[in-house]
Every structure is written in structure tokens, then in C-alpha cells.
Amino acid sequence: MAPHGEGSDAQIEEHPVSSILIVIAMQTEALPVVNKFQLVENPHTLFPEGVPWVHYHGTYKDIVINLVWPGKDLTLGVDSIGTVSASLVTYASIQALQPDLIINAGTAGGFKARGAGIGDVYLVSHVAFHDRRIPIPVFDIYGVGLRQTFSTPNLLKALNLKAGKLSTGDSLDMTPQDEATITANDATVKDMEGAAVAYVADLFKVPAIFVKAVTDIVDSEKPTAEEFLQNLAAVTAALDEAVTQIVDFISGKCLSEL
Ligand code: ADE
């Protein structure tokens, strides 16, 4: 996720960010952002017929904003959370929209031992997986899938966000093995999509940033699922506010100014 042109001699003329792709996994997280930017659902789907993925779009302060969420599972009717759906919808959206920047926004579990509290919003510096255990040389590193996110030091400074590392896995709960890897990943927050979105963004060299709001404290006595559901609506408001501030900050700026 290096900036466009980094590492090559080609001088690519920079322009203000004009197209943002927001990837959000849950409808409850997505709808406040859709309403805030007055996005409308695209009835002519970008996506192959039959998939549940949903695309909203609109223009805000001269930026074309596309928001996608993977929709409801076709059989069970629940949000299609997790890495598989996130990867697919990110892939299809990049192909169709060629965004300047991806924002993956969502909720996360936080570690109080590392300073996280309910409602805190993190701008993520690194992502990695914690449930891809492959104890064979080099495959082990591939499994962890550590990636640095697109660096936005000015954005971090300007907004009242915390900085931290994110660890991703396909479970809401945390096994002792997951916990050991999350600790090795030096993560403060834990989600179910981030590292997968980062993988796809990296494949296509699209800069990506990750904004995660804490709904539950993983290293506490409270059952995670209960705490998550209890705090989801309130914390989503904090997430929505952060995404708005981020887009306001980006408006009129080039990637190198973020
Ligand atoms: N999203 C919100 N809370 C989470 C948790 N504890 N683990 C993974 N994803 C989450």
C-alpha cells in the first residue's frame, strides 16, 4: 500500500483525491454513513447478478463516494461479515470503480491492557491475521499477512483518533492460540475484515486506511457477543462521526498530503 508511483522513476502528477471507496461489513455500521453523505443505492448493480453485495454512491465536497457492504447472506439473512465476503466485495469494487483510496470502516474488539476503551476510534497503522496458522517456514509469515497501512500522519494529527495495530480473524471470540498471535502482532484492536481488505488493496496497489471503533473489550470478563450487541448502535455513531471527519479532511488534498 505504498503511495502511487513510489519506488518507480515515473513522476505521476498528483491530484486531489477524487474517488473514495468505503468498505463496511455490517448494515448497522453502513447506514449512518450512507445517510450522512446522502448516498443512494445504485439500482444498476456493479456486481454480478445474484450476489447480495450492495453499492451506494454520491458526491460530497467534490469527492465521488462509493460505499459497499457485502449484504445479507442469501440463505441465512444475516450480514455477510468476515474475510471471505470482504475480500470479494473489495475485489469487485476496485475492478469496477478504480478508487483513489479505500477506507475500511467498522467496529472492533479492543484490549484494555493496551489502552482501548468502548467508543474509542482507531486509525490503524498495521494489519495482520491471527487465525492463519501455517507452521512451515515462510508460509508462517504468509499466514500472518502483516501489512503496513497507507500512512496518513497529517490526518492522524488533525483528528482526535487513536493509533494502533489491527489483527483480523474470522471469529468474534478469541481462542488462546488467537490471543497469542494477536499479542505477537502487537495489536490493540481485533476485527473480522481488515487484513483481508488490505490484502486485496495491496494486490491492486490501491492505498487503504482502516478506521475501527471499539464495541467490546476483549480482555475483560464480559461476554464479547453480549457487549458487542449492547454497544453496537452507540459506537456506530462514533464511527460515523470519524468517517465524516476523515472525508472532510481528505477533501481538496492529494494522497501525499494526508
Ligand atoms: N468486531 C467487534 N468486536 C469484535 C471482536 N471482539 N472480534 C472481532 N471483530 C469484532
Image: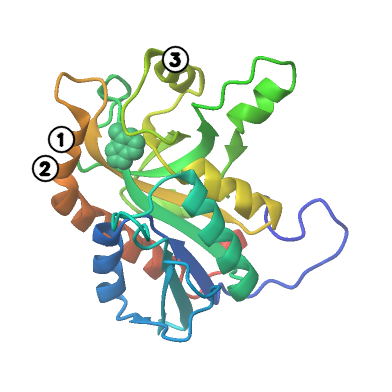
* Residue 208 spot, x, y in % from top left: 55, 54
* Residue 69 spot, x, y in % from top left: 40, 63
Ligand 1, seen in the image, is in the quarter at: top left
- Residue located at (49% from left, 26% from top): 130
Measured in 3D between alpha carbons, the distance from the residue under mark 1 to the one under mark 2, in whole angstroms, is 5 Å
Name the image quarter holding residue 40: bottom left
Q: Amino acid at mark 1?
A: Glu
- Residue located at (26% from left, 26% from top): 218
Q: Secondary structure at mark 1?
A: helix
Q: Is tag 1's residue or tag 3's residue first in the polypeptide sequence?
A: 3
Q: Amino acid at mark 2?
A: Gln
The disc at residue 177 is: 3
Measured in 3D between alpha carbons, the distance from the residue under mark 3 to the one under mark 2, in whole angstroms, is 27 Å
* Residue 252 spot, x, y in % from top left: 50, 75
- Residue located at (52% from left, 32% from top): 129
Q: Residues within 10 Å of mark 3 (few under 14, many from 20)?
A: few
Measured in 3D between alpha carbons, the distance from the residue under mark 1 to the one under mark 3, in whole angstroms, is 22 Å
Residue nearest the viewer, comparing 255 with 98: 98
Q: Is there any visible trace of residue 258 in the rendered image?
A: no
| Residue hosting label 2 | 230
Residue nearest the viewer, comparing 68 with 202: 68
Q: Amino acid at mark 3?
A: Gln
Name the image quarter holding residue 146: top right
Query: Disc 1, disc 2: CB below 8 Å?
Result: yes
Q: Secondary structure at mark 2?
A: helix
The disc at residue 227 is: 1
In this view, 18 is above or below 187 = below
